[in-house]
Image (spheres, rainbow, N blue to C red):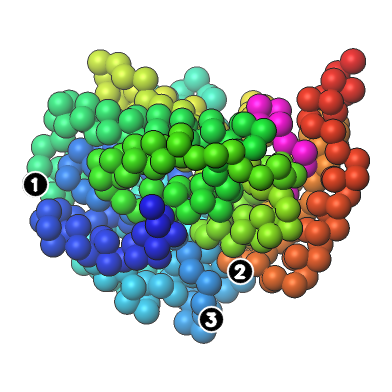
Amino acid sequence: MNFRQMAADRHTYAADWKARTGGKVADYFEPYFPEEIAYAAGILPVRVLAEHEPDVISDKWIYGACFPARDMINQFLRGRMDYMDGLVNVEGCQWIFNAYEVITNNKPALFRHYLFLPDYTDSTTSKDVLRSELAVFRERLEAWTGRDITDEKLDHAIAVYNENRLLLRRICELRRADRPVLTGSEYMDMLLANQVMDKAEMNGLLEQFLRELEGRQPGRDTIRLMLIGSETWNSDLERLVESLGGNVVVDELDNGTSYFWNPVYPQKDRLMALALRYLGRPHNPVKDNNWRRRPEHIFELAEDYHVDGAIISKQIYCHLHGTDNYAVWRLLRERHIPFHYMERDMSVPEEETALRLEAFLNQVRAGATRLAGWHRKAVL
Ligand code: SF4
């Protein structure tokens, strides 16, 4: 299964999908976008994935932003996203909001919607606030598409998305083995393809992939690493780690495991079920306020996947992860998990990064026992 190519061909896929289904395509960037509601209206939700290419266009519109936000404008102005009928922004990162404004102002014919999702997700009022925002979103989509979003259609969309999450979870679980049958780069390629494809089609491909994986021989014995930090849009870093004798066996990225980690628990009030799912997902730094969940979630993943160390990879100018890193560093130090911190834009500066990662892997190799060992030491 060439998931890498599927992610690379996402623009062609979306244009073909429209031609064969007659449906509309709505792009989004923020990970809290409730895809099920759009899917129930016959819309293909497509996650904007950044490219790494020279950008001389976006500076005119947005300056000093992180690379993903600039790249979103860059791709749009280059005409790569011409198939897009709508763009939805969920309350989140300010840079992405700015990119959303630039794009929608440049193309007034686009359907645009700003969906408010409370930053303090654990407040007693958050679920009701979000539920009412989802009701407004449903009405706007119905008016735009001319299709009713009935409870039956929502049930179908929730079932398709839950199936998708279950399949991804089963594949992710295979990485807990001492010698996982899949590499971190294969896994990331699969997740990126998953975020741009129709989930009903993708579920069929994931089932095939799962069968293929279950028939594979165990992989190499490697240093087991966790990837933490800002989103990523390619698997170059994982590939580099593999070339140095490591393997990324788990991550907590917004477009990694956090994308599919928790399902929707069906209930009679479908919109409330969705509100609870999105408020309860593993949080990124924007939404992880007051009652902090992110650091413990990172630790639980590190422990469950027996990691030897972690890489914290932050996009340059990503102030959200920049300010949250203090809590992550403190946690990793307290729990005796060695880590390497790096900043990047969409590319991985090969030679410098390779040198630094090689030194880190050697350090881990020299001192490594598995996390279980460190954890016991920390707890006893
Ligand atoms: S990399 Fe950071 S600043 Fe940029 S869009 Fe993502 S969260 Fe926002």
> Disc 2 residue type?
Ser
Judged left or right of residue 170, residue 40 is: left
Circle nearer the N terminus (3, 1):
3
Residue at image point 27% right, 28% down = 159
From this viewpoint, is residue 354 visible? yes
Across and down, in percent, residue 176 comes to: 61, 31
Q: CA distance from mark 3 to mark 1?
A: 40 Å
Query: What mark, if any, has residue 146 been given in the picture?
Result: 1
- Magenta-drawn stretch contains 123: no
- Circle 1 sits in a helix, a strand or a loop, which is it? loop
Across and down, in percent, residue 237 comes to: 63, 59
Determine whether 39 is above or below 26 in the image: above
Please say if the residues under marks 3 and 2 sit with CB atoms less than 8 Å apart.
Answer: no
Circle nearer the N terminus (3, 2):
3
- Magenta-drawn stretch contains 304: yes
Q: Using a 10 Å C-alpha cutoff, classify the residue at mark 2 as few (fewer than 14 neighbours), some (14 to 19) or many (20 or more).
A: some
Q: Quadrant of residue 111?
A: bottom left
Determine whether 270 is above or below 178 in the image: above
Closer mark to the observer between disc 3 and disc 1: 3
Residue occupied by mark 3:
54
Judged left or right of residue 83, residue 289 is: right
Query: What mark, if any, has residue 347 been given in the picture?
Result: 2
